[in-house]
Each structure stands twice: as structure tokens, then as C-alpha cells.
Image (spheres, helix red, strand yellow):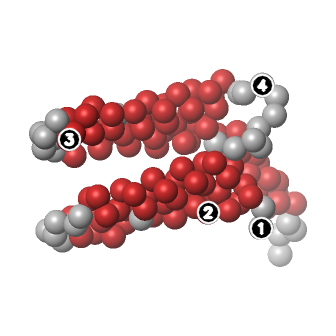
Amino acid sequence: MSRYRWGTLLIVLGVLVWVPFVVSLLQGGDPPFFLYLPIHLAAVLTGNYLRRGRETGPVHPTRRWGNILVTLGVLVWVPYFSLKSLGWDPPIYYFLPFHLSGVIPGVFLRYYQNLRDLWRRLAGQRSAQPNP
């Protein structure tokens, strides 16, 4: 498996780390946030590191906007952790929607070209198959 695919796998696993956290929250539990966060960050940042260097040539505008949105979505956590380091206890629910509203559309825009090409290939394969 290539470095790029390992990076993609790590990013997906880093995001999926939050599934048991959210399930526990929905069941009324109080899961340890700081247990899940380092695993998430380690997987996503390592995956991003492994995937770097693949792009060549000019960056498409949708990809550039995707990068900007992902960066802004991640930067939402700067004030959260700043307040946390000052001894305050800011509710995570004030910051999480802004993080997700930057990261989710950012990832979609970032990979829009790839998704469009995949969709066209799949649609082309379906139309090339003979009808029984």
C-alpha cells in the first residue's frame, strides 16, 4: 500500500475515533474528551503528513477554498484551548459546530474534483454494461 493510501486510512480512522465518544454522549455518559483528542490528532496529523507532496501544478480554486475552510475549522480550537489554559471551562458545544461547519464542507471542496471524476467513471462503467 502506498504512503498516500496509508495517510488516507489514518485520517479516516482518526475521524472515526469520535464515534464511540459521541455514542457515549448520546447514552448520557461523560466520556473523557482528552482521551479521544490525542488519538484523533495523532492519526489525522500523521495521515496528513503521509499524504503531503502528492500535488503538482496549480491548485484548483475549489481545492484552495477547501484548504482555507479546513484551516479555519481547525483554528476554531485556538480560543477554546486558550480559555482552557486560563482556567476557564468553556463548553465544547459552543466550538464544535464551527469546527464541523468549516471542516466538513472544506473536505468536500478539497476533494470535489476527485469525487466528480469518480462519479463520472462509475457512471461510465454502468452505461457501458449491456442490459440483460
Between residues 19 and 40, which one lies in front from this camera angle?
40
Above or below: residue 68 compared with residue 34:
above
Q: What residue type is labelled 4?
A: Pro
Q: Mark 2 points at which residue?
A: 9
Q: Mark 1 points at which residue?
A: 1
Q: Is residue 56 left or right of residue 98?
A: right
Above or below: residue 112 compared with residue 3:
above
Label 4 sits on a secondary structure element that is loop
Upstream in the sequence, badge 2 or badge 1?
1
> In which quadrant of the rendered view does residue 87 lie?
top left
| Picture residue at 82% right of the left edge, 60% below the top | 125
Disc marking residue 84? 3
Upstream in the sequence, badge 2 or badge 3?
2
Upstream in the sequence, badge 2 or badge 4?
2
Q: Spatial distance from mark 3 to mark 1, Cα to Cα?
A: 40 Å
- Mark nearest the camera among 2 and 3 is 3
Q: Mark 4 points at which residue?
A: 58
> In which quadrant of the rendered view does residue 78 lie?
top left
| Picture residue at 77% right of the left edge, 38% below the top | 55
Between residues 87 and 103, which one lies in front from this camera angle?
87
Task: Mark 1 and mark 4 in contact? Answer it, CB < 8 Å.
Answer: no
| Picture residue at 85% right of the left edge, 66% below the top | 129
Upstream in the sequence, badge 1 or badge 4?
1
| Picture residue at 77% right of the left edge, 43% below the top | 54
Q: Spatial distance from mark 2 to mark 1, Cα to Cα?
A: 10 Å
Q: What residue type is labelled 1?
A: Met
Task: Mark 3 and mark 4 in contact? Answer it, CB < 8 Å.
Answer: no
Q: Which amino acid does label 2 sit on?
A: Leu
- Mark nearest the camera among 3 and 1 is 3
